[in-house]
Amino acid sequence: MVDYDNEPGLATLACHAGQVRTDELEQSEPLFLSSSFCFASAAQAAARFAGTEEGNVYSRFTNPTVRTFEQRLAALEGGERCVATASGMSAILSLCMALLSAGDAVVASRSVFGTTVNLFKNVFGRFGVKTTFVDMTSLDAWRAAIGPDTRMLFLETPSNPLTETADIAALAALAHEHGCWLVVDNCFCTPALQRPLALGADFVIHSATKYLDGQGRCLGGAIVGPEKIIAEKVFPFLRNAGPTMSPFNAWVFLKGLETLTLRMQRHSQSALEVATWLSRHPRVARVHYPGLASHPQHALAARQQRGFGGIVSFELADRAQAWRLIDSLMYFSITANLGDAKSIVTHPATTTHGRVSQAERDEMGIREGLVRLSIGLEEPGDLIGDLEQALAAIPA
């Protein structure tokens, strides 16, 4: 890369950061589909395995294509180092296994993805890590839940599926006051719209499967954080346990990152149009979208984000109405993903949060009539027309 005095913009970093051309002088990043790498001598092999010499060893933990993706995402997030993983859930698993021990405690937002709830409760709980779930928008609730054994605060902001927004800077100050790490899942915004590390967070988690890819092609995850902790704790876990991103998936994500800023702008613009239209529809009881002035954390979201994202949730009277609408839509796919170029519709109470208890869903505010939309790159007018005909199909 050219070394200029001025820091490159996000769109420039998304196209160039991390790329090292080979002797072939390729324009697109090369794809290294190799499970292992050769050494010039036995001594070099020993040095690579011992870690006294940098270089490729085995693609479980060193691969040039994966490394390029890691360096590019770290640059976009403004972080020192990134470790790529096989999925977003394996990113959370890897970070927590690397940082936490039996007897430690975590305070987490209760408004997280249903599988994340189960991971903290049913997996980490079996290994002696206790998790307390709190209202993510209440700083007092976070403060009251922190105890002498608390090591980590964990949240998604905006949340899934209600797009609640937490004050990252305030939570970072609280976490550091008590000697804790603040971990922010930045899946909904990506660094194109929000940079948690710049607001004081210690680690950022990504499901690269979502907006970083942008076309629903591959699974992947990532952790971005301080060089020293990543090198000494997280990377050794990845090397030994193997929740590794494949080189092919890393190459796909690199292509996704090149258009990330453009896509997130379009997702945000279209989502605001759809949310505004839904907020005026008589059949819709409530719309959850940070870009609306009616959203409880609208001012906060406007302050700490560069855009409001592509996720819109809204409430109908009950499950029957929600399912009727979902089944009547033409342009929205019913599928287990978000962040795609194609729009997606989900019924959270029976899918993403279907394996958490009814009591937990009630606490989260996930009611039976809630519908989540991932607004894609189609013409927003077409999406609104589709929603209009689907709402009209609901019996009065």
Image (spheres, helix red, strand yellow):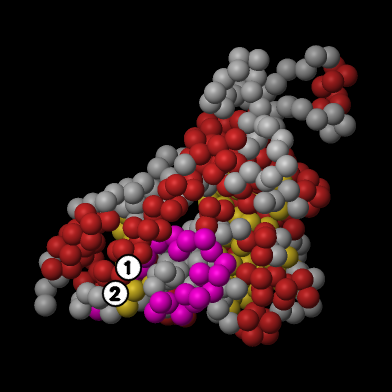
Query: Which residue matches tag 1?
Result: 275
- Name the quadrant containing residue 125: bottom right
Residue 382 drawn above or below residue 160? above
Figure quadrant of the C terminus: bottom left
Camera-nearest residue between 303 and 32: 303
Residue 279 image label: 2
Residue at point 60%, 35% (across, down): 16
Q: Position of residue 317 (x, y in %)?
A: 25, 78
Residue 387 image label: none
Query: Taking 143 as reference, is 252 left or right?
Result: left
Q: Position of residue 86 (x, y in %)?
A: 57, 43
Residue at point 32%, 52% (across, down): 343
Camera-nearest residue between 171 and 239: 171
Residue at point 76%, 44% (across, down): 236
Identify the element where label 2 is drawn. helix
- Name the quadrant containing residue 122: bottom right
Residue 244 located within the stretch drawn in magenta: no
Q: Position of residue 376 (x, y in %)?
A: 34, 52
Residue 157 drawn above or below residue 49? below
Query: Taking 110 as reference, is 105 left or right?
Result: right
Q: Residues within 10 Å of mark 2 (few under 14, many from 20)?
A: some
Residue 345 drawn above or below residue 371? above
Q: Position of residue 183 (x, y in %)?
A: 65, 62
Tell me where the magenta segment starts and ends, as one range.
Answer: 293-317
Residue at point 63%, 76% (across, down): 132
Residue type, numbered disc 2: Ser
Q: How far apart are labels 1 and 2 at the CA level?
A: 6 Å
Q: Is residue 82 in view from this perspective?
A: no
Q: How many marks?
A: 2
Q: Quick check: marks 1 and 2 in contact, CB under 8 Å?
A: yes
